Amino acid sequence: MDVMFHQAFQELSITTRGRGLVEFTGEVEAWIAKNKFCDGLLTLHLRHTSASLLIQENADPDVRRDLDAFFARLVRDGDPLFIHTAEGDDDMPAHIRAALTAVNLSIPVQHGRLALGTWQGIYLWEHRTHPHSRRMTLHFIGE
Amino acid sequence: MDVMFHQAFQELSITTRGRGLVEFTGEVEAWIAKNKFCDGLLTLHLRHTSASLLIQENADPDVRRDLDAFFARLVRDGDPLFIHTAEGDDDMPAHIRAALTAVNLSIPVQHGRLALGTWQGIYLWEHRTHPHSRRMTLHFIGE
Amino acid sequence: MDVMFHQAFQELSITTRGRGLVEFTGEVEAWIAKNKFCDGLLTLHLRHTSASLLIQENADPDVRRDLDAFFARLVRDGDPLFIHTAEGDDDMPAHIRAALTAVNLSIPVQHGRLALGTWQGIYLWEHRTHPHSRRMTLHFIGE
């Protein structure tokens, strides 16, 4: 069946309190609901290189604590391997943590709902130790 | 040139036999062929947080064995760092392995074929040690 | 507002000089400009399993050096864990480095510009030690 499609963009800012995972599934769902998007593809693009986007478990907060603890041990702040140190001990680890995850995600939207599993939430993962305001672009194409 | 577009969704379940990579390129290609999709964008979204989607070599099975062996050594089952342990020694490692890879992929479709390289296959990577049934949403938008 | 959409494909080859990051943001922007794409979604798919696509900082080249140094230490060439060794000591590490990053990216295009942050560039990350020619498919859908 052929239909007419439309698309939309939205800037979204998330304020972080330093290293850790911040869920913002609700903000994305609110944008979908407000615009009455029904079926299509949602893409999120984070405009930074020291934070990332992650889909992970939204039930037990210990999962987020363990994710962050594992990454902190895997990519050590102040590791003498690094020569890019001008912006602080946590800066190069933040770039590496971002490279190990992702800055964009694409999720189908069906019947007005994100095709997420029961336990999936969308997170901004702040990799710097200090608070930041992180900006992303949301894009929807569909019906 | 302007054309009329259409989109489609499909639920796909893959049964795993415990930790390891299961190729399902054929299932995706069969859905494209059955629906006579010609040109567009295919997105796959896995609805779980302890398994992931991966595009990797489909020739030598030793590559999949080595991928799994490397990840098992990098993220140790039962690591005392983890406090989220109620669901088993392999559960938190499964979340981390999923975070290190991805739960969604978008692949162009051109002339009815996925734009995969000669040696690329699409895999479900089960990160839990026990067998599971894993569900994903396929989405196509295009002509 | 309903509009007529269009899509386009482009093959792009990037020649690498061995392991390391090669920026090609300019090539993607040139394709967008040449075709006068205004608003839509751009997807890049790399047709290889031992190289990857990465969005990372485009300012200080030390960031790329440190990214590569970290990955070289994390995934050791010639690690005796690996049994897939027929194609060289750097081949299985290249597959793992590709699995830890990604082979496709989707980036919104708004007002004819990629929705990249100020410091974000698009890179091909060559994971093999020898030079290669790497092929990718660009796909645009939108207005």
Image: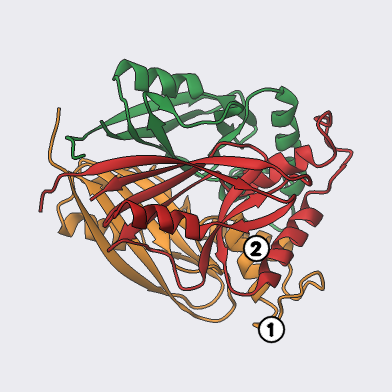
Chain colours: A orange, B green, C red
Q: Same chain for the residues at labels 2 and 1, yes or no? A: yes
Query: Which residue matches tag 2?
Result: A96
* Mark 1: few/some/many CA within 10 Å (<14, 14-19, 20+): few
From the viewer's side, name the closer residue of B91 and B51.
B51
Give coordinates of residue A42: x percent, y percent.
31, 50
Q: Amino acid type of disc 1?
A: Ala
Left or right relative to C40: residue C90: right
Residue B56 vertical position relative to residue C73 in the rendered view, above or below: above
Q: Residue furthest front?
A: C34
Q: Where is the C terminus of chain B found, in terms of image quarters? A: top left
Is residue C130 visible to us here?
yes
Foreground disc of the pair 2, 1: 1
Q: Where is the N terminus of chain B found, in terms of image quarters? A: top left
Give coordinates of residue A120: x percent, y percent.
42, 48
Q: Residue at x 42, y 57 (%)?
A: C30
Q: Could you give the CA–CA distance between mark 2 and mark 1, rounded to whole angstroms? A: 16 Å
| The label number, if any, that marks residue A86 in the structure image | 1
